[in-house]
DNA sequence: CTTTGGCATAGATGTTCGTCGATCGATCGG
DNA sequence: CCGATCGATCGACGAACATCTATGCCAAAG
């Protein structure tokens, strides 16, 4: 590997010098896992549907119709959203009510803003 | 698939009344596609690596080493990040330099904050 | 013009993911 | 208890994805 003419300065074989430490692999894996939970059209719609309900909670029977998917599929997505810390599950009677975790999505957005540009050691 | 209260078909009450219109399927698909671009550990590290370089740009030879992947794989991920509007590609001589699109990641974070709870308009 | 080096593309492969139908535990009404 | 309903789990299937090796393209060097 040869350095490009105007920009190379380092003693290593790097083309451009490095100013900060990049994101560690472990942190990248963790953030990516959280982002994967919302990087899916159905799950975004489910979050929006829950938020659109009074009290910001809804049972599964409220959601299967609007997203036009089978009940097992909806339960599967809801489980992923709960595991990601974006929804909570509360069983009342025969129904399972899902509610938004306040600030969870905003927190994820904030981490996204700061993780790439701002993590110097 | 029956609801405890009388089954409704429209946006009126089912289990819980609806207060807002949920996210449209088209918007959910578009947002999910953008999120998928960053919901991957290697791509997050690549974004961070580019941000860590002087001038916030780097060529492929700068990135293959740190992420410990083959050069075609790195090119593949960079292409996805360019398609998502997060990186720009500029060829100078034999080298292809990738740079962050200013504000792209922040804009995505803002959309994420407002899309679920905010009004769809 | 030939060679060399950086990078993109193509094809192949193993894994992950989204979806469904079938089933099962749990709960409520008679 | 009995039958019905809500919702979670299981097993399967097809699509999408991340990765590799091999190859092609283009610019610079000799």
Image (cartoon, coloured by chain):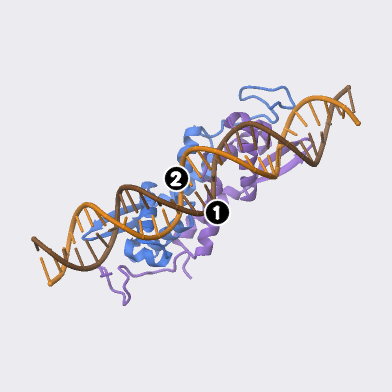
Chain colours: A purple, B blue, C brown, D orange
Instruction: Give A94 or D1, whichever is nearer the viewer.
Output: D1
User: In which quadrant of the rendered view does residue A20 lie?
Assistant: bottom left
Q: Which subunit holds the residue at mark 1? A: A
Q: Mark 1 = which residue? A: A33
Q: Which subunit holds the residue at mark 2? A: B
Q: Mark 2 = which residue? A: B34
User: In which quadrant of the rendered view does residue B43 lie?
Assistant: bottom left
**Residue at coordinates 49% horizontally, 59% vertically from top-left?**
A115
Asked whether residue A92 is in view, the answer is: yes
Spot the residue most to the bottom.
A11
Q: Can you say which quadrant of the picture contains the N terminus of chain A?
A: bottom left
Tell me whether circle 1 and circle 2 mark residues in contact (CB < 8 Å): no
**Residue at coordinates 72% horizontally, 22% vertically from top-left?**
B6
User: In which quadrant of the rendered view does residue B44 lie?
Assistant: bottom left
Question: How far apart are the two marked residues, 1 and 2, measured between alpha carbons?
Answer: 15 Å
Relative image position of residue A91 (x, y in whole percent): 76, 40
């Amino acid at each position: 590997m040869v350095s490009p003419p105007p920009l190379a300065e380092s003693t290593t074989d790097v083309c451009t010098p490095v100013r900060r430490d990049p994101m560690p692999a472990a942190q990248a894996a963790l953030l990516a896992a959280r982002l994967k939970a919302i990087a899916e059209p159905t799950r975004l719609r489910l979050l929006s549907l829950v938020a659109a309900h009074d009290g910001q909670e809804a049972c599964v029977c409220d959601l299967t119709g609007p997203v036009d998917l089978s009940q097992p599929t909806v339960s599967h997505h809801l489980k992923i959203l709960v595991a990601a810390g974006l929804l909570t599950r509360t069983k009342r009677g025969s129904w399972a009510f899902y509610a938004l975790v306040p600030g969870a999505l905003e927190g994820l957005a904030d981490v996204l803003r700061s993780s790439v540009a701002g993590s110097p050691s």
